[in-house]
Image: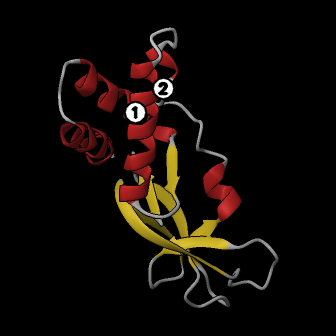
Amino acid sequence: MLLILRRPWEAIDASDPENPQDTIIPAGVHEVERIDNPFGRPAPWIVLEGTKIGATRGSWTQWEDSPGDDQVTIIEGGLDEWVERALTNAKAVLDEPVVDPSYLSAHARAGYKVLAEGGTEEKAREAIATYYTCRA
């Protein structure tokens, strides 16, 4: 699972649940995992892989549709799966000219643009993946 942050983000280091510490996760693409809540509550946490640095899933997902640098993206299944879904959406819009490409997500539009200009699917995949790594 991946967590994409477009700015540094406040999180909690719950390595010692008796003494949690505030910390900052830098902007970027981070490998994360779901764990049981370190404080014994029912809400699962999403943390940096191999750590207890993170927050509840809800703390992250509330920001998924936020504009600009406040947007948080959680990618289940990894970047390759996400790129393939975006490519599928871009190709579908390309095949159906009545659909406005502005309805595509920003990363799918990056792939759509490459395909619309005659580029290969591989170049479209690169554009989609690069959108994430350059935006983060």
The amino acid pointed to by label 2 is: Leu
User: Residue 120 occupies which quadrant of the picture?
Assistant: top left
Q: Position of residue 75 (x, y in %)?
A: 49, 56
The dot on residue 94 is: none
Which residue does the image show at 38% across and 64% down from the upper left?
Answer: 30
Asked if disc 2 and disc 1 are in contact, CB closer than 8 Å, the reply is yes
Whether residue 32 is visible: yes
Residue at the spot 62% in from the left edge and 87% down from the top edge: 19
52 left or right, relative to 7: right
Q: In which image quadrant can residue 106 be found?
A: top left
Between residue 102 and residue 112, name the one nearer to us.
112
> Closer to the camera, 15 or 44?
44
Kindly state the secondary structure of the residue where label 1 is placed.
helix
Q: From this view, report whether residue 31 is shown above or below residue 41.
A: above
Q: Amino acid at mark 1?
A: Ala
User: Element type at marker 2?
Assistant: loop
Badge 2: how crowded within 10 Å, few (<14), some, or many (20+)? some
**Residue that carries the numbered disc 2 in the rendered image:** 104
| Residue 106 showing in the rendered view | no
Marks 2 and 1, Cα distance to the nearest angstrom?
6 Å
Asked which quadrant contains residue 66, the reply is: top right
Residue 44, placed above or below residue 122: below
Image point (66%, 57%), residue name: 59
Q: Which residue is mark 1?
A: 108
- At 18% from the left and 22% from the top, the residue drawn is 118
